[in-house]
Amino acid sequence: MRILVVEDEKKIAGFIKRGLKEEGYAVDVAADGGEGYELASVNDYDLIILDIMLPKCDGVTVCKKLRAEKLETPIIMLTAKTSVQDKVTGLDAGANDYLTKPFAFEELLARMRVLLRRAVQPATRLQVADLALDLLSHKVSRADRDIILSSREFALLEYLMRNTGTVVTRTMISEHVWDIDFDTSTNVIDVYINYLRNKIDADFDQKLIQTIRGRGYMLKE
Ligand code: CA
């Protein structure tokens, strides 16, 4: 899951980014409305956290522009104001939810889970052959044997499973599973693919993760 945080207050942006990374999300931060709009237009995010008071272009305008372009990504607005009118304005602009600053990080996570759950329905469970991944409980199993994955391995496997039967390049993987600061010159992706292979394929005759020479990887029955 890749999240965009549009927030000009460095302290708050840093706090959200650190917290979400610890939860296994890939996080990009934009420091003004213009940059936020650019990133949201170019990249494929699972959720956007959007402050209202921003330099260059305020959050309500950014939200309206994105919705006008048919972007359906869930958006949580952050507001320092508590007036009902601001909340109504944000929701009217197409935001799915809002949080008033200061907020507890746990509350942000809870609201994100609600929106992400809604966005992934009805597929809350992915299955390829005897490999199953539950998006809500984050449980993975193969042939009814539980498999423990790190949050990054889980994100990588989820991405491969969502694209079953399709070749995914290292660039596609880096864009969906890692954040914008990911150094594409490293072999980190191959290393993680190997971690996954050891956990989901090594003990089984049928290998699900295929290497497509010169192109990337594919999960296939
Ligand atoms: Ca602000």
Image (spheres, rainbow, N blue to C red):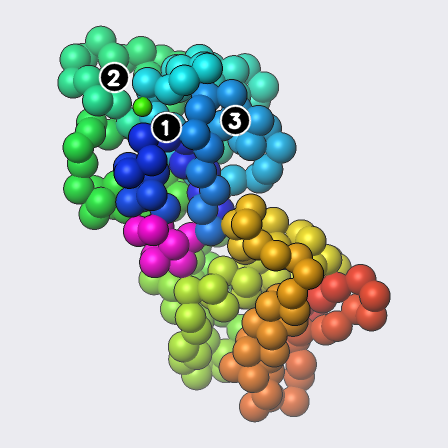
In the rendered structure, the answer to whether residue 54 lies left or right of residue 217 reads left
Foreground residue, 69 or 163? 69
Contact (Cβ within 8 Å) of mark 2 with mark 3? no
Look at the image and tell me whether residue 208 can be seen. yes
Q: For disc 2, does the CB lie below 8 Å from ligand 1?
A: no
Q: Position of residue 79 (x, y in %)?
A: 25, 23
| Residue at left offset 38%, top offset 54% | 21
Q: Nearer the viewer, mark 2 or mark 3?
A: 3
Q: Residues within 10 Å of mark 1 (few under 14, many from 20)?
A: some
Vertical position of residue 198 compared to residue 137: above or below: below
Q: Quadrant of the C terminus?
A: bottom right
Residue assigned mark 1: 8
Q: Position of residue 27 (x, y in %)?
A: 45, 46
Vertical position of residue 83 compared to residue 160: above or below: above
Label 1 SS: loop
Q: Nearer the viewer, mark 2 or mark 1?
A: 1
Amino acid residing under circle 1? Asp
The numbered mark at residue 35 is: 3
Query: Is residue 45 inside the magenta stretch?
Result: no
In the rendered structure, the answer to whether residue 166 lies left or right of residue 41 reads right
Q: Position of residue 144 (x, y in %)?
A: 44, 81
| Residue at left offset 58%, top offset 19% | 69
Bounds of the magenta span? 18-25
Q: For disc 3, does the CB lie below 8 Å from ligand 1?
A: no
Mark toward the start of the polypeptide (2 vs 3): 3
| Residue at left offset 80%, top offset 62% | 215
Query: Is residue 21 inside the magenta stretch?
Result: yes
Mark toward the start of the polypeptide (2 vs 1): 1
Task: Using the numbered discs, state the Cα–Cα distance from disc 2 to disc 1 in whole angstroms.
Answer: 19 Å
Amino acid residing under circle 3? Glu
| Residue at left offset 21%, top offset 22% | 80
Residue assigned mark 2: 87
